[in-house]
Each structure stands twice: as C-alpha cells, then as structure tokens.
Image (spheres, helix red, strand yellow):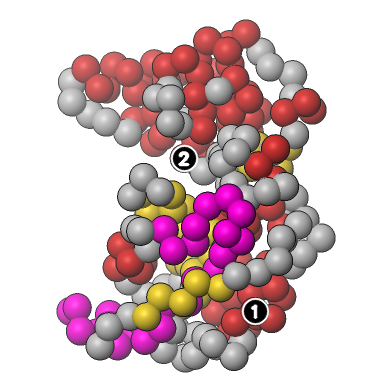
Amino acid sequence: MNVEIVPITTRILTPKDDIVEIIDRYTRRICGPDDVITVAESVVAITQGNIIRPDEMEISNLAKICCRFIPDYGSLATPHGMQALMEKEGEWRVTFALIGGFLGKLIGQRGLFYKWGGRQAALIDDVTGTMPPFDKCVVYGPEEPDKVVAALKSRLNCFGAMIADVNDLKRSRIVAATPGMNAQLASDLLIDNPFGNASQKRPICVLKNFRQYQEQQK
C-alpha cells in the first residue's frame, strides 16, 4: 500500500497558538488510526515563542568571525544566526565546535560541528528561513519536541507523530518522533518538502496509511 501525503494549509500561526490544539482543529477529520501526523519544526518553535528579532540582538565580534566559516546556504552563515546559536549554546562551545569541525574535515570526518555545537546548531532558521511574517526573525528549534509529538499522538489517536526539519535542498531531518513508527522511513517520504516554504502556509502533513506502508517495508 502506498502512502498518500496530504499537506494541510493553515492560517498564519503565532506564539498565541497552541500547536496541539491547532493541529487537532485542522486534521481531526483527516488523520486516522493508521496515519502519521508530521509538522514543520520552525512552526512548532514559533508557537512556543522561540523567536527573536535581529534588532533585539547585540552581535559580538566573535559571532561575526565565526559565521564566515559556515557555507553560504546555512542559517549560521550570518552574524545574527551565529549570535543566536551562541546565546543558546555558549560562545566558547560553539567556537571550539567550529574549530573541531574544521579539523575533522581535514581527516575526512564531517558533521562534527553540528554534533558538538549543541542541539540548536542544526535547528536555527535565520531571517527569511521560515514563513512570513516570521521571516523577519531568527527562529530557534522547538523546546521539548518529544513531549509535543507524544501529545499529538494522544490527542489525534493516530499511529504516530513527528516533527521534521525539511527544506528545498532535499534534506529531511527528524527532530522528534513517537515510538513504534519508523521515523527515518517517514522522513524519507518528506524529502521533496511537501510543507513548502515561505508563504505556502503548509506546516502540517498527514501521511495516510503509513502503518501499512511500514509493515510492507519490513
């Protein structure tokens, strides 16, 4: 059985919204007991108020230097993105992770910066990295994501729930998923980014018949 991916268009979500209540409202007639509910990580963070405007930040010289060593397409390649990470994870942790990551690349080990730089290193979205009007803000990763997906599964009585970090560069990363579902299998189904970016306002996707699909893949 194939999985049907159903993107859900919503209104603009804000820190005044409860993400579980919102997803229940928009999907209660769509999501069934064999389905998986997936939600974009940046939108979960926005509803938690995990955002900051660049004009509220004081950029350190260290952040200005360190951001130059991040590829241009990364959210940490700007002083604001790097400063946001340093404020969450600590200046020296980030700096040493950057140095360690560079040295690791010299011996063929990649990804050490994101391993050592703290949880937020892979989750922060810089300005323009998410939907308006929050494209004017730096958006951190969501807090307590495991509790969010557990609450979603319980409320919707579905097979599973997952928070994913997906972009148009064919990257799909699992932030949190409920036990029992094959999260990597679900993540692979999102590789073409059905959430969309910017103004599409599709922060939720339902993976219909995922339970049966998972059984077939065993």
Residue at left offset 29%, top offset 16%: 103
Residue 24, how many percent across, how many down?
65, 80
Q: Nearer the viewer, residue 188 or 193?
A: 193
* Magenta residue check for 111: no
* Magenta residue check for 213: yes
Q: Amino acid at mark 2?
A: Ala
Q: Quadrant of residue 124?
A: top right
Which label sits on residue 51?
none
Residue 66, how many percent across, how many down?
50, 15
Residue at left offset 62%, top offset 35%: 127
Which label sits on residue 26?
1
Residue 107, how many percent across, how many down?
18, 20
Relative height, residue 80 to residue 130 (above, below): above
Q: Tell me how far mark 1 sits from mark 2, CA to CA.
A: 28 Å
Q: Quadrant of residue 179?
A: bottom left
Relative height, residue 56 to residue 103 (above, below): below
Q: How many marks?
A: 2
Which residues fall within the magenta stretch? Answer: 193-218
Q: Mark 2 highlights which residue? A: 122
